Image (spheres, rainbow, N blue to C red):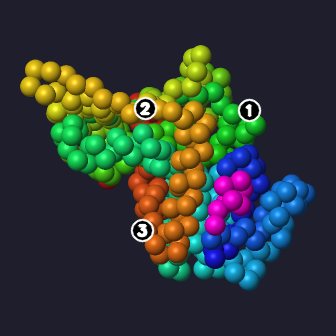
């Protein structure tokens, strides 16, 4: 049995983690912690969780507690994670890992010292369309990849106003949505190393943080990727996509499609998408959380590690530097 302490009782915990974890076999939520302890108590009663506290420190000595889920606003990620790690707990952190590269590196150093696992929530890796696309690429069905175009455009959530507060969030849409797009690109390209970045940021409806980013990543392999992410582009619907181009064909998601050349003929195949976008979204989280629990149990290797997160943060900070100095930034 994996005993869980959940820290942060906001929207992501209420809509995703608590419903999914409470229904999962082999796990038990032992405590919910939140600075608004009244909120923690209400949720604890709803999900039949035995304890509710204001801080994670109060819960760490609970019998059977092995794992901490960090679902606070981003400014709390590093401090909560480091407290849990120092107590020998495995940690799951909702993305991003932290506000800065330095904070993420501090989490990694402490995790290495105490020998615990840290996973960062990147649920898109567990979407079936992303899995299908990556499998096709890994099998060589579209040949060597030379170009990826990916993006996520949606309106900023009005119930998370802290996202536009740089001190709390660490950045704007690049940290909120863009880091997910970057992780997806790196995942698709099997974590090939980025050599340099060029980026531009926009402030259409926000002041302290950016609400739009366009960036180009140059890989050491010679491949190129473009990233587009925004809270302020005006569209009738959200846009979430990843288009991958190889020597022999191309692959697309949302929905998944594979295009290949056979002789002089272009063939296109698709997988029926019978689920709604909400069902796809929830299923990806369910699969992700099950993976983490199995990794804690030693059944499968941990993915989306703190090492991966550090590389993503290195790219994010390079994009910010590129936008500020209006030039290409080489990543050491």
Q: Which mark is residue 94?
A: none
Single out the mark in the foreground, 2 or 1.
2
Please, is residue 289 above or below residue 281 in the view?
below
Q: CA distance from mark 3 to mark 1?
A: 36 Å
Q: Earlier in the sequence, mark 3 or mark 1?
A: 1
Name the secondary structure under disc 3. loop
**Residue located at (69% from left, 81% from top):** 64
Q: Give the main secondary structure, helix, strand or loop, of the magenta stretch.
A: helix
Residue 18 in magenta stretch: yes
C-beta proximity under 8 Å, tags 3 and 1: no
Asked if residue 206 is positioned above or below residue 97 in the image, the reply reads above
Tell which circle, 2 or 1, labels the residue nearer the N-terminal end.
1
Q: Which residue is mark 1?
A: 158
Residue 223 in the image, given as x and y percentages of width and height: 24, 38
Report the disc number at residue 272.
Answer: 2
Q: Quadrant of the N terminus?
A: bottom right
| Residue visible at 65% across and 31% down in the picture | 156
Percent position of residue 112, x then y: 47, 76
């Amino acid at each position: 049995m994996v005993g869980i302490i959940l820290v942060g009782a906001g929207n992501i915990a209420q809509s995703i983690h608590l419903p999914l974890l409470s229904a999962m076999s082999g796990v038990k939520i032992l405590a919910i912690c939140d600075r608004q302890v009244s909120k923690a108590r209400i949720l604890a009663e709803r999900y039949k969780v035995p304890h509710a506290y204001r801080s994670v420190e109060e819960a760490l000595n609970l019998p059977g507690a092995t794992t901490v889920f960090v679902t606070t606003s981003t400014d709390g990620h590093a401090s909560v994670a480091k407290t849990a790690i120092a107590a020998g707990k495995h940690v799951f952190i909702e993305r991003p890992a932290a506000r800065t590269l330095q904070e993420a590196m501090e989490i990694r150093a402490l995790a290495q010292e105490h020998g615990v696992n840290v996973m960062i929530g990147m649920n898109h890796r567990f979407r079936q369309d992303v899995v299908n696309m990556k499998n096709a690429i890994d099998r060589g069905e579209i040949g060597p990849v030379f170009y990826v175009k990916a993006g996520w455009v949606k309106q900023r959530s009005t119930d998370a106003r802290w996202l536009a507060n740089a001190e709390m969030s660490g950045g704007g849409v690049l940290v909120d949505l863009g880091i997910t797009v970057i992780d997806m690109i790196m995942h698709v390209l099997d974590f090939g190393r980025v050599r340099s970045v060029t980026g531009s940021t926009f402030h259409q409806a926000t002041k302290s943080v950016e609400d739009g980013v366009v960036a180009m990543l140059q890989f050491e392999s010679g491949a190129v990727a473009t990233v587009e992410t925004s809270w302020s582009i005006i569209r009738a619907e959200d846009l979430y996509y990843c288009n991958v181009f190889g020597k022999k064909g191309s692959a697309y998601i949302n929905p998944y499609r594979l295009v290949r050349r056979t002789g002089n003929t272009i063939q296109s195949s698709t997988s029926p998408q019978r689920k709604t976008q909400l069902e796809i979204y929830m299923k990806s989280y369910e699969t992700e959380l099950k993976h983490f629990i199995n990794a804690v149990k030693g059944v499968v290797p941990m993915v989306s590690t703190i090492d991966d997160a550090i590389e993503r943060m290195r790219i994010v900070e390079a994009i910010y530097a590129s936008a500020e100095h209006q030039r290409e930034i080489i990543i050491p």
